[in-house]
Image (spheres, rainbow, N blue to C red):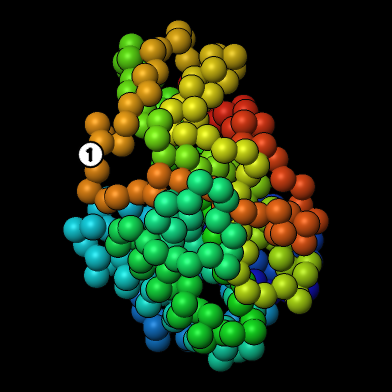
Amino acid sequence: MMKVLLAGAGGQLGWELQQCPPDNVELVACTSADLDIRDEAAVLALAAELSPQLIINAAAYTAVDKAESEPERAFAVNADGAAHLALAARQVGARMIQLSTDYVFDGSHSSPYSSSEKCSPLGVYGTSKYQGEQRVRAILPRQSVILRTAWVYSTHGNNFVKSMLRLMAQRDELGVVADQLGSPTSARTLAQAVWGFTAQPQLQGLFHWTDAGVASWYDFAVAIMEEALVLGLLPAPVVVKPIRTCDYPTAARRPAYSVLEKSTTWEQLAVPPLHWRVALREMLAALPRG
Ligand SMILES: NC(=O)c1ccc[n+]([C@@H]2O[C@H](COP(=O)([O-])OP(=O)(O)OC[C@H]3O[C@@H](n4cnc5c(N)ncnc54)[C@H](OP(=O)(O)O)[C@@H]3O)[C@@H](O)[C@H]2O)c1
C-alpha cells in the first residue's frame, strides 16, 4: 500500500480525490481544519507521524480577486504553505504533487502554453502560485510534480458552473466575458490525472493538465445553459450576451488566453482526456436535484 497525505481535502479537487483513490492507496485526507498548511511545525509533525510516501497539495487560496487586497494570506498559503509541505516531504523521503494554475501566464500568446514557457503572472494569486511552484521545485528538485490546471469546477464547492446555474435561475439575461479563452476542467477528471501520477513514480517536473478543447467564459456559460436545459436543471432559456473584459471590471487582471499545451501529459498518463463539454455534461448530471 502507498500512504498518501492529502492537504486541502475540503476543496473541489480534494473532495474529488477522495472519491476515486487507486486500490493500492491508503489516503489520509486533511481539511484546513485538520491541517493548516501555513503552520510549518504542524505540517512537519504530521508528516513525521504518518510517514507518507506521497504528499498531495490540493490546498490553496483560490480567491483570485480577493487576493489583490490580501496578498499576505495568498502568499502564506500558496507559497509558504506549499514550501512547508515540500519540507515535510523531504524530511520523510516522500514524493509531492503540487497543484498550480494557468494564471502563472500573462495570456499574451495565441497558441497553447507549453510547460517550458516563461511565466509572467498578472495578479497576486498567479504570483503566489508561481512562487509556490518555485519553492517546491527548489526543495524537492527530483521528487516533485507540479501540475498546472485551469478553470476547475465540481459538483462540490463553489465555481463558475454553479454560479451560472444560480444566476440563470434568477435572471432573464446575463452578460458573460467572451474575450478570455481557456479550458474548463472538471475536478473529477483532474483527480483521475493526479492519481495517474501514482502509477508512474518516475515522472517529475512540470506538467499541464486540463480537459480537452478551448472556450471563452461566454462559450462555457452558453454550454452550461444548453446542457442544464436538456437535463431539466433550468426551467427556461435565458439570454446570454457576450461582453468584453473591459465591460466587467474585476480587482485582478486575468490572462486573455491561458490554454495549456498538455498533449505530453495526456500521452504519459494512462488517463484519457475528455472534451470539456462532455465532462461538463457528466458534472451537471451528477448534481444533486432540488
Ligand atoms: N479553482 C480553479 O479554477 C483553479 C484553476 C487553476 C488551478 N487551480 C488550482 O487547483 C488546486 C485545487 O483547487 P480547487 O479548485 O480544488 O480549490 P478550492 O475548491 O478553493 O479548495 C481549496 C481548499 O484549500 C483549503 N485551504 C485554504 N487555505 C488552507 C490552509 N491554510 N491550510 C489548509 N487548507 C487550506 C480550503 O479550505 P477552506 O475552504 O476551509 O479555507 C479549500 O478546501 C489549487 O492548487 C488551485 O490553485 C484551481
Camera-side residue: 267 or 97? 267
Residue at screen point 50% across, 30% down: 220
Q: What is the quadrant of the N terminus in the image?
A: bottom right
Side of 262 relative to 35 (left or right): right
Q: Is mark 1 within 8 Å of ligand 1?
A: no
**Observer able to see residue 59:** no
Q: Is residue 159 visible?
A: yes
**Which residue is labeled 1 in the image?**
249
Amino acid at pointer 1: Pro
* Closest to the observer, 248 or 270: 248
Q: Is residue 99 above or below residue 91?
A: above
Q: State the residue at coordinates (51%, 87%).
A: 139
Expressed as whole percent of the image width and height from the top left, the position of residue 131 reads 40, 73
Element type where label 1 sits in the image: loop
Residue 85, position in %: x, y? 49, 78
Mark 1: few, some, or many residues within 10 Å (few <14, many ≥20)? few
Q: Position of residue 11 (x, y in %)?
A: 47, 53
Which residue is depicted at the point 36% across and 19% down?
241
Task: Name the residue at 42% across, 69% down.
Answer: 130
Residue 48 placement: quadrant: bottom right
Between residue 21 and residue 196, name the one nearer to us: 196
22 relative to 178, above or below: below
